[in-house]
């Protein structure tokens, strides 16, 4: 995807005080309209339509606090997985191994708790250490050896799955010990929301602050926009891509531990189904809030929008295929809206030129 | 005037915004399309509620209770009954086609136990279940020419030419858990839809019993798996026959939801159908993993879940009271029955077709272990060894 940055011509601080108050209000309104422009938050409008539609369609179940809880509780792991991808994607690196890292982390933590009687904190620490190791191997393969990240991380993912199968024989790790503190990691609720919802929000805040408010975050974006140009300006692009894969693996590892807590077992294939939904959410997120940039809040908006739609359809007892169709339509619609808007802001189409002449 | 000007300015800005943001119109159009799609989806909803109006059928309830009482006792009889009265040749080579899943690994281990006892060699060809890999496995079999082949849960249409060729070469092929009937090429099938159907009856009986004949239930189906169709039919028929005061509905889950949002779909269904308190899972492990946590997070603490074909996670759920019951899958008995069919063919005695599969409703009270898949018949292996005349 093209990662262009669009700047609006905002008034300089020197100009602003000289403006008439009415003009300032008008400028503020224009700024708000820009912020709420469908170009930036099309998913928000889709979300509003979803809320209105399902509130009318299934008024007895949808417009309830329980729905919000269900949407967030049911999509917290996808949210974390998508956020894990945000930083490497911003640095123009794919990490297809994250889903396998999730499985590995969950299995590792469950193994040490159930089979080795390790204290929970040590087992989780071991799972995160293993995840970091995966990230390190990914980084070696992609950055040091120069293998294309799409292929390289797919290969490491395959090796991780083989390793999991070798160790577990594809049998989930279960034990009564996993229903104590281990399950609480994923199942304990605070205010009606399971802990992974809070993990997701914390990770989102961290990613947002890191990408938007630190020099390193800007260097990551610069690396993603044009790696060669960034390198020529002195940015250590290889180091940035290396570290982005470490961060991705660490977050994926935590998502995997949370998922294992939700399941109450270490499932050898638990992470795999999250591969495509997480990428879908991350790419949808890149069209929101800051179009053209992978960003934390856009990603969460994408996750919530898709989650609200699928939950609404399920509450309305829609057919089994409806959920996938909805996801596909929303993805195409959101991406198409952004693309069309970008074209509209760039070279006018032949059709548009004809209209102007008319 | 100022106010009017402001309004006018605002209106102009809005108009300008609309002009400069044609995307707003497109978004609204897309939203309208979305709404129309959703409406269409709603119009074609498949869920079918059956509101009960009849009184509790006491005779039906008693019948259900009798079934539950009978099937919560551990079965003692294996599928096969007749001893093999001719010598079973040793040194046979058997190939097992594995799908590389935990189930396949378990099946391999059980078959290995049986073939070792008979003095046979067991090989395994692993594949990932894709048609290409399945065909490739059969090509390998035709080259290796083993004496017998065992496979599980694969549609014959994928490899029918190879199967027919194998039969011509004298290779004996037996299978489990398929809708394909036995014939000259596929000499024996166990776990047929007819043999599996009883599981649906038992799940229905359990729920009728637990609800005193007034259950509002949902059957969570994986209709993509044809073999489960018979289980579903028996479930619905039993509910209809024995429980006129019960209401039964079906929630179909696509394969693409497995491992992802199945618990969320079930929670949504239960929230939109607050009368439904009983859930039947057509496949325990695939549909039930993560369900207790999702029910708990949604505050649905009064839901009773029964399934069939538990995996290790399900056993833990039952042990810890998070799932009420399951109908254990007779892996051991069916795999031993497949080896038995090969033994009979090698020995030159008739194969016992259409055997009765033992079923067992397992709950927290009679669960033998929560750490591994167990045989339904406790001494099933010894009974088979006795039929085969080996010690």
Image (cartoon, rainbow, N blue to C red):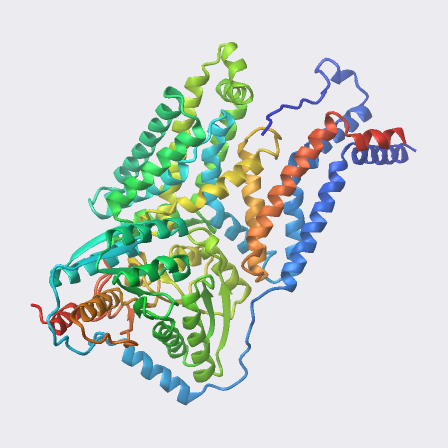
Q: Quick one: A104 or A27, which is closer to the camera?
A: A104
In the image, farthest residue toward the bottom: B59
When asked about the image quadrant of residue A113, the answer is top left
Tell me the residue at 48%/19% (across/down). A216
Q: Is residue A27 above or below residue A252?
A: above
Say whether residue B238 is visible: yes
Task: Answer yes or no: is residue B379 visible.
Answer: no
Residue appearing at x 21%, y 65% in the figure: B339
The image quadrant of residue B117 is bottom left
Q: Left or right of B5: which side holds A297?
A: left
Provide residue B56's location: percent of width, then percent of height: 46, 85
Q: Quadrant of residue B149?
A: bottom left
From the viewer's perspective, tell me whether residue A219 is left or right of residue B129. right
Q: Nearer the viewer, residue A319 or A312?
A: A319
Q: Residue at x 57, y 46 (%)?
A: A306
Q: x, y percentage for residue A302?
A: 57, 41
Q: Nearer the viewer, residue B325 or B191?
A: B191
Locate residue B254, reporting x and y percent.
Answer: 49, 57
Quadrant of the frame with the N terminus of chain B: top right
Is residue A6 shown above or below B276? Answer: above
């Amino acid at each position: 995807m093209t990662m262009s940055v669009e700047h609006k011509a905002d008034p300089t601080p020197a100009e602003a005080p000289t403006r008439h108050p009415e003009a300032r209000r008008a400028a503020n309104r224009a700024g708000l309209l820009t912020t709420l422009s469908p170009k930036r938050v099309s998913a928000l409008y889709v979300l509003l339509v979803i809320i209105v539609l399902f509130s009318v369609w299934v008024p007895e179940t949808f417009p309830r606090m329980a729905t919000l809880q269900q949407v967030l509780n049911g999509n917290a792991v996808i949210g974390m997985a998508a956020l894990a991808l945000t930083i490497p994607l911003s640095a123009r690196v794919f990490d297809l191994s994250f889903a396998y890292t999730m499985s590995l982390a969950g299995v590792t933590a469950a193994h040490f708790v159930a089979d080795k009687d390790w204290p929970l904190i040590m087992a989780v620490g071991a799972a995160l250490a293993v995840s970091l190791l995966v990230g390190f191997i990914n980084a070696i393969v992609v950055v040091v050896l120069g293998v294309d990240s799409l292929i390289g991380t797919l290969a490491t993912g395959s090796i991780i799955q083989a390793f999991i199968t070798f160790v577990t024989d594809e049998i989930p790790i279960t034990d009564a010990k996993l229903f104590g503190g281990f399950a609480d990691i994923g199942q304990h609720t605070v205010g009606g929301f399971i802990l992974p919802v809070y993990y997701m929000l914390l990770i989102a805040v961290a990613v947002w602050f890191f990408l938007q408010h630190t020099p390193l975050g800007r260097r990551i974006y610069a690396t993603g926009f044009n790696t060669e140009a960034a390198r020529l300006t002195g940015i250590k692009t290889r180091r940035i891509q290396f570290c982005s894969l470490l961060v991705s693996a660490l977050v994926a590892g935590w998502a995997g531990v949370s998922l294992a807590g939700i399941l109450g077992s270490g499932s050898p294939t638990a992470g795999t189904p999250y591969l495509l939904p997480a990428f879908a959410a991350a790419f949808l997120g890149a069209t929101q809030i800051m179009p053209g940039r992978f960003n934390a809040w856009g990603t969460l908006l994408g996750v919530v929008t898709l989650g609200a739609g699928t939950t609404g359809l399920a509450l309305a007892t829609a057919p089994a295929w409806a959920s996938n169709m909805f996801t596909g339509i929303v993805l195409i619609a959101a991406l198409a809206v952004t693309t069309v808007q970008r074209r509209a802001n760039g070279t006018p189409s032949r059709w548009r030129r004809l209209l102007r002449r008319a | 005037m100022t106010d009017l000007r402001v309004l006018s300015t605002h209106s102009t800005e809005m108009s300008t915004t609309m002009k400069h943001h044609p995307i707003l119109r497109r978004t609204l159009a897309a939203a309208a399309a979305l709404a129309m799609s959703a409406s269409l989806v709603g119009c074609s909803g498949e869920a079918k509620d059956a509101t009960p109006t009849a009184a509790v059928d006491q005779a039906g309830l008693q019948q259900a209770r009798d079934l539950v009482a009978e099937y919560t006792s551990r079965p003692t009889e294996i599928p096969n009954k007749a001893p093999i009265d001719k010598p079973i040749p040793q040194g046979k080579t058997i190939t097992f086609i594995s799908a590389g899943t935990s189930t396949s690994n378990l099946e391999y281990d059980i078959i290995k136990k049986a073939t070792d006892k008979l003095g046979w060699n067991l090989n395994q060809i692993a594949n990932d279940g894709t048609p290409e890999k399945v065909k490739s496995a059969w090509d390998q079999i035709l080259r290796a020419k083993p004496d017998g082949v065992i496979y599980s849960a694969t549609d014959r249409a994928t490899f029918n030419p190879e199967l027919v060729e194998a039969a011509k070469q004298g290779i004996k092929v037996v299978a489990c858990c398929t809708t394909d009937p036995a014939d000259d090429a596929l000499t024996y099938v166990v776990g047929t839809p007819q043999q599996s159907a009883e599981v649906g009856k038992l799940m229905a009986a359990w729920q009728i019993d637990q609800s005193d004949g007034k259950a509002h239930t949902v059957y969570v189906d994986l209709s993509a798996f044809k073999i489960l169709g018979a289980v579903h039919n028996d479930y619905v028929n039993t509910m209809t026959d024995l429980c006129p005061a019960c209401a039964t509905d079906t929630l179909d889950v696509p394969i693409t939801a497995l491992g992802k949002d199945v618990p969320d779909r079930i929670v949504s269904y239960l929230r939109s159908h607050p009368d439904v308190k009983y859930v039947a899972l057509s496949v325990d492990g695939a549909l039930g993993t993560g369900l207790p946590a999702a029910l708990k997070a949604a505050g649905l603490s009064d839901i009773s879940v029964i399934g069939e074909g538990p995996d290790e996670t399900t056993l833990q759920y039952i042990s810890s009271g998070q799932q009420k019951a399951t109908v254990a899958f007779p892996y051991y008995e069916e795999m031993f029955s497949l080896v038995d069919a090969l033994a009979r063919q090698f020995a030159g005695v008739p194969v016992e077709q259409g055997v009765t599969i033992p079923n067992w409703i397992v709950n927290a009270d009679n669960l033998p272990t929560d750490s591994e898949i167990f045989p339904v018949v406790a001494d099933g292996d010894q009974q088979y060894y006795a039929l085969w005349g080996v010690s």
